Amino acid sequence: MKMEIYGVLLMLSFIVSTETQVEHRDAGFFGCSDTEKEFLFGFDGEELFHSDFIRREGVVTLPDFADSVGFAGFYENSVAQMEVCKNNLDVDIKVYKPSVEQLDPPDTSLYSKDVVVQDVANTLICHVTGFFPPPVNVSWTKNNQIVTEGVSLSQYRRKNDGTFNIFSTLKFTPKEGDIYSCTVYHKSIQGRPKTKTWEVDVALPSVGPAVFCGVGLTLGLLGVAAGTFFLIKGNNCN
């Protein structure tokens, strides 16, 4: 059976000691198959850099608030590493000829990035996790119609147990009653793709508190007025 992906994971752990000991994990991963290439570096489970082989450039993925970090020459190195990976893959297929392939099916969850507000742009996130081996394919629909615009797919993220995560996102504008779905295809579930659905349900602000506040304020003012009236009447009687 042909092995479809070959990966090399490099992990370094080091201890930083001040008053207490803190362990951090620095990781690098590269892999290849007949159709896909992966090359990335991470730190403590967060991605720092990956190579975009379609755009032919390196991508620094640190958040905006982090100190800037450079990865000079990393993309060029990743291109060379892919050639090494392909050669090693061919050798491994010929030598090992695996008879049983490990297959772990994916788990899928679907949720919005931000609180859903009618007619305000948002993002749907389809999180696919726990699968092996890559790749997985992800497709989107809106009201049972296939959607391709506004769709993106992250790099594969390797978990400590050897399985993988990946995120697919869809930019959308919520409209009450619209139904979206995310369908995941993987060789472990051939013929039984996993689909998650998500319906736009815009929560309207409750009128209860406003009504109660209005009624309470009105009754309070009436009470003050009535008290003032009887106070004046009482003074006149005296």
Image (cartoon, helix red, strand yellow):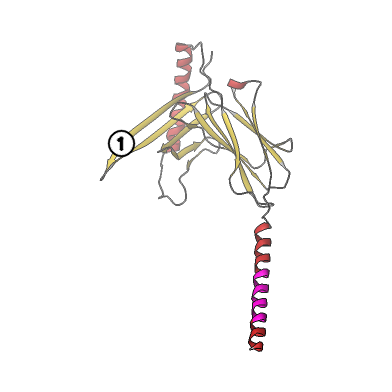
Q: Residue at x 41, y 28 (%)?
A: 9
Location of the N terminus by quadrant is top right
Q: Residue at x 65, y 73 (%)?
A: 223
Report which residue position mark 1 lands on.
Answer: 14
Residue 193 horizontal/vertical position (percent): 64, 25
Q: Which secondary structure dominates the residues rendered in magenta?
A: helix
Residue 183 horizontal/vertical position (percent): 65, 31
Q: Which residues are magenta?
A: 218-230
Residue 148 horizontal/vertical position (percent): 67, 38
Q: Nearer the viewer, residue 136 or 214?
A: 214
Q: In this rendering, is residue 204 above or below 151?
A: below
Q: In this rendering, is residue 121 above or below 83?
A: below
Q: Nearer the viewer, residue 81 or 218?
A: 218
Q: Residue at x 34, y 33 (%)?
A: 12
Q: Residue furthest front?
A: 238
How many marks overall?
1
Indicate yes or no whether the magenta region holds residue 188.
Answer: no
Rendering quarter of residue 19: top left
Tag 1: amino acid: Phe
Q: Give neighbour class at mark 1: few <14, some 14-19, many 20+ (Cα, 10 Å).
A: few
Location of the C terminus by quadrant is bottom right
Q: In this rendering, is residue 175 above or below 104?
A: below
Residue 80 horizontal/vertical position (percent): 44, 30
Indicate yes or no whether the magenta region holds residue 229.
Answer: yes
Q: Residue at x 49, y 31 (%)?
A: 38
Q: Is residue 170 left or right of residue 166?
A: right
Rendering quarter of residue 84: top left
| SS at badge 1 | strand
